[in-house]
């Protein structure tokens, strides 16, 4: 069975600090996708990034960067120079391709990030 | 904004009642999935609809049912409501061109008393 573990539950940083959110996953599938979503207080899940299991290249998008390592089954997310607007709950998710659904997402429990001014 | 809309935004029901939640998919998206998010937890997959048929289901009892319409809008129906059904219900849609990426609506917050 697939599983996503986000061991950190709450992180609090001061504005402009860098912060890394950890994600560890379990799957028996060889083809899968990993995601990060952001959930602000409004409740809507905002898609941030998707990675497939064959692409281990790290990615940078502005202040955001992602480190995917298959050897450790991890897909970590770093926010550089954090801002107050980054305060939200961040979810890591996994989808497999053989579940009978086009994309059934398995989510971690989420990490609540608070950025203080 | 993703273009996925849900109604109503909030709902209060009593135990034993039935509820219908609605979702309008993003334009061009033909697959819709529903998730339940309890307070302090990650979303849990309920089921997915593609071409108006159920296309995968999570670990939820049959009193959770759904429909998808020809215009790709969708409904989630829950019968015989229980207190534990209190949660945020999220609808997500994806397109044929990119079925792996799901775009979520703002959710319906259901409280069962």
Image (cartoon, rainbow, N blue to C red):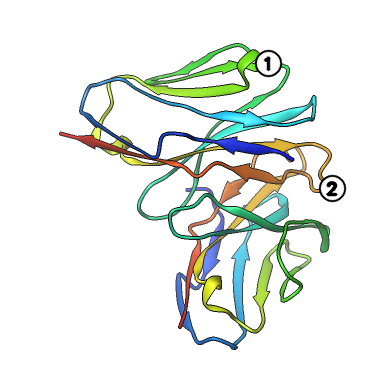
Q: Quadrant of the C terminus of chain B?
A: bottom left
Q: CA distance from mark 2 to mark 1?
A: 23 Å
Please tell me which residue is depicted at 56% across the width and 52% down the height of the picture.
B43
Give the left or right position of residue B57, taking residue B27 as reference.
right
User: Along the line of sight, which residue is nearer the eye, B84 or B104?
Assistant: B84
Could you say whether the residue bearing mark 2 is in a helix, strand or loop?
loop
Which sits earlier in the primary sequence, circle 2 or circle 1?
1
User: Along the line of sight, which residue is nearer the eye, B7 or A93?
Assistant: A93
Q: Which residue is mark 2?
A: A100
User: Along the line of sight, which residue is nearer the eye, B49 or A70?
Assistant: A70
The image's mark for residue B31 is: none
Q: Which residue is mark 1?
A: A55
Give the left or right position of residue A86, taking residue A95 as reference.
left
User: Along the line of sight, which residue is nearer the eye, A91 or B72?
Assistant: A91
Please tell me which residue is depicted at 54% across the width and 61% down the height of the picture.
B5
In the rendered image, residue B94, in percent from the top left (x then y), is placed at 68, 46
In the rendered image, residue B24, in percent from the top left (x then y), is placed at 61, 63
On what subunit does the disc labeled 2 rest? A
């Amino acid at each position: 069975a697939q599983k996503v573990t986000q061991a950190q539950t709450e992180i609090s940083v001061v504005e402009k600090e860098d912060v890394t959110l950890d994600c560890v996953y379990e799957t028996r599938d060889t083809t899968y996708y990993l995601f990060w979503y952001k959930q602000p207080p409004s409740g809507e899940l905002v898609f941030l990034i998707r990675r497939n299991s064959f692409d281990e290249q790290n990615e940078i998008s502005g202040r955001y960067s992602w480190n995917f390592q298959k050897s450790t089954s991890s897909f970590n997310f770093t926010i550089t120079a954090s801002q107050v607007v980054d305060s939200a709950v961040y979810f890591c998710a996994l989808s497999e391709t053989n579940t009978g659904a086009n994309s059934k997402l398995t989510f971690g429990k989420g990490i609540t990030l608070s950025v203080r001014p | 904004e993703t273009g996925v809309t849900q109604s109503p935004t909030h709902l209060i029901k009593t135990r034993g009642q039935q509820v219908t939640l609605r979702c309008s998919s993003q334009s061009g998206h033909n697959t819709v999935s529903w998730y339940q998010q309890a307070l302090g937890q990650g979303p849990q997959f309920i089921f997915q609809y593609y071409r108006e048929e159920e296309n995968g289901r999570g670990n939820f009892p049959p009193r959770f049912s759904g429909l998808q319409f020809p215009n790709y809008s969708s409904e989630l129906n829950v019968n015989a409501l229980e207190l534990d059904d209190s949660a945020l219900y999220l609808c997500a849609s994806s397109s044929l061109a990119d079925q792996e990426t799901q775009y979520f609506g703002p959710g319906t917050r259901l409280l069962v008393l």
